[in-house]
Image (tube, grey):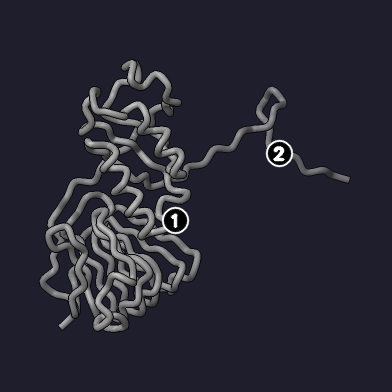
Amino acid sequence: MTSSTASTDPAGLPRIRAGGRSFLALVLTPEAPLDIWLAALDHQVSRSAGFFAGKPIILDLTLVPLDTPHLADLLPALVERGIRVIGIEGADRDEPVFSTWEWPEGLNGGRSTAAEEIPVDSVDEPELPPGTLIIEEPVRSGQQIVWADGDVIVLGSVASGAEVSAGGSIHVYGSLRGRAIAGIVGRPEARIFARVMEPELLAIDGFYAISEEMPEALIGKSSQAILVDEVLTLKPLT
């Protein structure tokens, strides 16, 4: 009779297995006055319920001077909203204004992807920039695709309850019924294309629109979403 046990080192102790897993963290960059910024955040959250749920957040305080009113209340206010801050940048934890904060330990190795021009002249047969992710299967409800390195092309459909996030543009050759979030690394020139546009939410470079805010004439049609003066706008594909 034999027994199966975990592999051990020479000392007789079990070996510890460690693997890697990467996650995309969103960066929030507050601006003064903070009460107005928090009100704007609440408005965005109300329009895209659950958008921050389960997502790691980096809080960038670069644009907030130390003498900004209510700065000491900022992190508790975010925690109250269910926003999980895993790192803070652009400030010194030893400053007295942060004395009551439970300051998370810093993370190493994070980087922002530099902005680059994405060709948008051809809609029917777009060139594939380096780093493009092609998904040949439908994206089903509950699935979440995150690809920060470039465009995402979905050859099938994106179901209601699914979410696709891309550093560049998003191309859906079927129906887009879930959520599409483009330009997540700071690319306002990114676009969202769909053969059948029926989304729950669209976002480009942090600017959002939910289905109720989109023109009815373009719902269910071949459309593209772009930013026009920081307003997410739907246009027909011609």
Label of residue 50 in the image: 1
* Left or right of residue 139: residue 92: left
Which of the pair 13/200 is nearer the observer?
A: 200
Q: Position of residue 146 (x, y in %)?
A: 38, 56
> At 13% across and 63% down in the image, what residue appears?
228
Q: Is residue 206 above or below residue 192?
A: above
> At 38% across and 31% down in the image, what residue appears?
107
**Residue at the far right in the pictured view:** 1
> At 43% across and 70% down in the image, what residue appears?
139
Count all numbered tags in the image, as a single digit. Answer: 2
Q: Quadrant of residue 154?
A: bottom left
> At 68% across and 37% down in the image, what residue appears?
7
Q: Residues within 10 Å of mark 1 (few under 14, many from 20)?
A: few
Label of residue 6 in the image: 2
Instruction: Label 2, secondary structure: give it.
Output: loop
Quadrant position of the C terminus in the picture = bottom left
Using the rendered image of the protein, determine whether residue 203 is visible from the camera's viewpoint: yes
Q: Is residue 136 above or below residue 165?
A: below
Q: Position of residue 104 (x, y in %)?
A: 43, 28
- Indicate the amino acid at tag 2: Ala
Q: Position of residue 6 (x, y in %)?
A: 71, 39
Quadrant position of the N terminus in the picture = top right
Q: Quadrant of residue 220?
A: bottom left
Q: Position of residue 140 (x, y in %)?
A: 48, 71
Q: Is residue 148 above or below residue 93?
A: below
Mark nearer the viewer, 2 or 1: 1
